[in-house]
Amino acid sequence: MIRVLVVDDQVLIRAGLAALLRAAGLEVVGEAVDGEEAVRLAAAVKPEVILMDIRMPGINGITATERILAAAQGAPPKVLILTTFDLDEYVFNALRLGASGFLLKDTPPERLIAAIHTVVSGDILLAPVATKRLIEAFVDPPPAVETPPPALDRLTSRETEVLGLVGHALSNKEIAERLSVSEGTVKTHLNRLMAKLGLTSRAQVIVLSYDCGLVRPASR
């Protein structure tokens, strides 16, 4: 049973999410009213997934996400950001810090449950195209240079290629087809490059692909 922590400062939303998760057979291990309580509960109950409201009084969802992931021992929890607007710089900053994805608060219940199972499986980031669109809206394009950034020196040529394809919002299956390899091989390359670069989520991989200039934002 997947262990979920729900974080939202609005009691009706928090209670509604908790009831929905329980009805779907998930275990709600805690409910937090703000970021400070979220950090405390995450350390105490060790959830697999955190539904994190982004805008809260006091410690917001960005700071809470950063503190929770930095303090995690062993496998960090998957943080799904809950937001009202899909193009939100707060959400972008949370993804850069390691959040696994984001959902609009009007997301249908079945999609919310599916998203939780998706991030726990670690296969693909939910709504990769929407995530790419968000990142393109706020990332600062790097200056045009002839030499690759130092971060890429640690990667093999194939790992660098996978990094760029993930940045183009391709799924593991699509990358496997593009490279004529198995999905398992793609996951191996992805896991290795994430370990080398200290990344914890696919969203961070997408952000880095832009930061390194492997992918360029579309004209704004």
Image (spheres, rainbow, N blue to C red):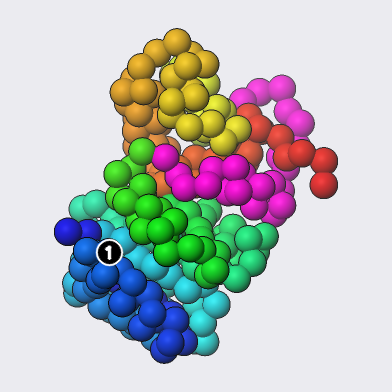
Foreground: 215 or 119? 119
Foreground: 83 or 156? 83
Above or below, 196 relative to 6: above
Task: Tell me the magenta residue range.
Answer: 124-150
Q: Residue at x 45, y 10 (%)?
A: 180
The local crowd at label 1, few if under 14, some if 14 to 19, many if 20 or more residues have their Cα within 10 Å, is: few
Image quadrant of residue 91? bottom right
Residue 22 rendering spot, x and y as whole percentages: 25, 71
Q: Secondary structure at mark 1?
A: loop
In the picture, measured across the screen, residue 71 lies left or right of residue 107, that is left
Residue 160 rendering spot, x and y as whole percentages: 50, 24
Above or below, 94 relative to 143: below
Judge whether residue 202 can be spotted in this image.
yes
Q: Is residue 130 magenta?
A: yes
Above or below, 86 relative to 174: below
Residue 145 rendering spot, x and y as whole percentages: 73, 28
Foreground: 92 or 126? 126
Judge whether residue 207 can be spotted in this image.
no
Q: Amino acid at mark 1?
A: Ala
Q: Residue at x 48, y 63 (%)?
A: 108
Q: Residue at x 21, y 73 (%)?
A: 29
Q: Quarter of the image for the N terminus: give it.
A: bottom left
In the picture, measured across the screen, residue 199 lies left or right of residue 218, that is left
In the picture, measured across the screen, residue 37 lies left or right of residue 53, that is left
Q: Is residue 76 magenta?
A: no
Residue 209 rendering spot, x and y as whole percentages: 58, 36
Q: Residue at x 40, y 58 (%)?
A: 110
Residue at the far right: name it: 219
Image quadrant of residue 77? bottom left
Q: According to the image, label 1 marks what residue? A: 24
User: Total label count?
Assistant: 1
